[in-house]
Image (cartoon, helix red, strand yellow):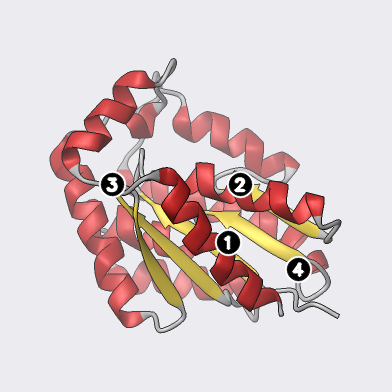
Amino acid sequence: MYKKPVIVFEGIEGSGKTSHINYISKDLKKKKLKFVKLREPGGSLNSEKIRKLLLNKKNRFDKLTDLLLYLSARNENIKNLLSKNYKKKIILIDRFSDSTLAYQYYGMGIDYRLIQEINKIIVKNFKVDFTFYNIVNSSNLKKRLRKRQSLNRYDMFKFSFYNKVQKGFLILAKKNKKSLIVDSNRPMEKNRNIILNKVKKLLS
């Protein structure tokens, strides 16, 4: 029997996290392993509805409204998707609790304790087993955002904001012993192999 960990891919826009999680999910399919893959915000039906609201570039929300919408989307996922599959299937998540801290605390300055207290109520005993923190320099970030066919609201912040968020991720990575920093400025293939090898160890 293989283990059924919860693996999270964190990082700012253009950091390669989504490409990596998609690559790992394809590998799991080939091996016919049971897994669940979701993104935040998004995942369950109601969470996807909240995602559309949050990322619509025509919308403008107060930063506290933003926080509560993200946490509401997570609550929908925990209740309707994650709790049902926890320890039963491999779970891959594109952004989770650390993103809330990186964006809403380190990026926007919302009270740290407020974020943590609400998040604890939502996630309860659901625990992440390993986190990949994907980082990117400003030059590559700008290039990758320019290549996107359409930009959502979170793709349109000032680069100084993304720098604050990424510094937040690096602080969180230092505190997290069950994690790995992935430098996405390196060739994609090199990082894929590093991540794939780590995931194999997590499953064995």
**Pointer 4: residues within 10 angstroms few (<14), some, or many (20+)?**
some
- Residue 196: image tag: 1
Query: Horizontal and vertical percent for residue 63?
Result: 31, 45
Query: Horizontal and vertical percent for residue 3?
Result: 75, 78
Sequence-wise first label, 1 or 4: 4
Sequence-wise first label, 2 or 3: 2
Indicate whether 92 appears above or below 119.
above
Q: What amino acid is labelled 4 in the image?
A: Ser
Q: Are marks 1 and 2 in contact (CB under 8 Å)?
A: yes
Query: Horizontal and vertical percent for residue 53?
Result: 52, 30
Q: What amino acid is labelled 3 in the image?
A: Asn
Residue occupied by mark 3 = 185
Kindly state the secondary structure of the residue where label 2 is placed: helix
Indicate whether 90 appears above or below 55.
below
Q: What amino acid is labelled 2 in the image?
A: Tyr
Kindly state the secondary structure of the residue where label 4 is placed: helix
